[in-house]
Amino acid sequence: MSDLDSFKEAVLKDAPRFTENDKFRFSCNEGLSCFTQCCADITIFLTPYDILRMKKRLGISSDEFLEKYTIVPFNKKQRLPLVILKMGGDENKRCPFVSPKGCTVYEDRPWACRMYPLGLASPKEENPAKEEKFYFVMEEAHCRGFGEQKEWTVRKWLEDQGIAEYNRMGESFKEITLHDYLQKGGDLGPAKMEMFYMGCYNVDKFRRFVFESRFLQYFEVDPETVERIRTDDLELMKFAVQWLKRALFNEPTVKVREQLLQTKIQELKKKEQAL
Ligand code: SF4
Ligand code: SF4
């Protein structure tokens, strides 16, 4: 069992379950001796929206962000590629974005950094609607923030950290990761895994794929959408999810051009006649 699996098992078994109305005491501030110490040697999974926010903040492309700041771990049990923030190569493995004054990308920090010290768990990840999700508090010994007097409800903390926007943006991503095909044990081959990686995490590469290949000759995309996705990363990210549903699961979410279909049908008919 991996460390992550053991952690999940322990949370589900032992962690007190918090609702949005439950309270905890916590404050993270520059006056604490532990300030910024926790931004090192940690596993932070990045969502597509995390990457979008951070690459924009840094003024670089998603290709460059992925190359410089992430790793993609892989094990045989894994069904989809995951992206992790790469810690620095120094002795303490510090996050590349931490400074003595705190997080240098604070306004655009990832979902996981916003949530801390809260965690979110679901007894049955693949079907969160059926089983109640719950929050838990990760009270770590080195974290002095728990000795502070500031009191929060879970709801207030989530509001303060701007979590709702991140959750909203994550919804369309879940249409892929929690898709029935995958939940029922379906596998994606290497080519489809590549498509997933590009569509979800590398928005600039996906844009080149749409505008610098025969994509728009093959698929019917209305002109307003074409204009929106040309310049707007968020719109492109949403469109990528629709395209992935077609490319990975053969759903009719993006239409193949009628004329192209007819040509293909005629080609097939000719082949059949020639046999
Ligand atoms: S260890 Fe806790 S209190 Fe200290 S910097 Fe990290 S989150 Fe803040
Ligand atoms: S992104 Fe910011 S908050 Fe998150 S680990 Fe790095 S420095 Fe800390």
Image (cartoon, helix red, strand yellow):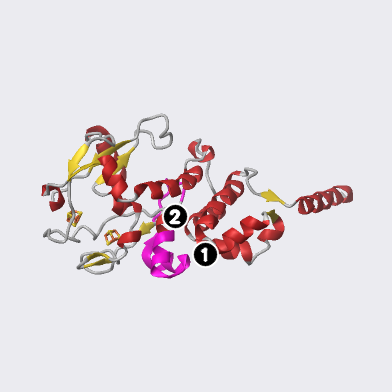
Quick check: 253 left or right of 107?
right
Quick check: 31 left or right of 153?
left
Q: Position of residue 222 (x, y in %)?
A: 67, 54
As drawn, 220 above or below 174:
below
Nearer the N terminus, badge 1 or badge 2? 2
Residue occupying image coordinates x 21% and y 67%: 101
Residue occupying image coordinates x 27% and y 56%: 42
Label 1 sits on what residue type? Asp
Quick check: 36 left or right of 79?
left
Q: Label 1 crowding class (10 Å Cα cut-off): few <14, some 14-19, many 20+?
A: some
In this orientation, which residue lies closer to the viewer: 274 or 128? 128
Tell me if residue 133 is in the magenta stretch. no
| Magenta stretch in the rendered image | 52-80
Q: Position of residue 110 (x, y in %)?
A: 34, 56
Callout 1: SS: helix
Report which residue position mark 1 lands on.
Answer: 204
Report which residue position mark 2 lands on.
Answer: 48
Residue 70, quarter of the rendered image: bottom left
Marks 1,2: beta carbons within 8 A: no
Label 2 sits on what residue type? Pro
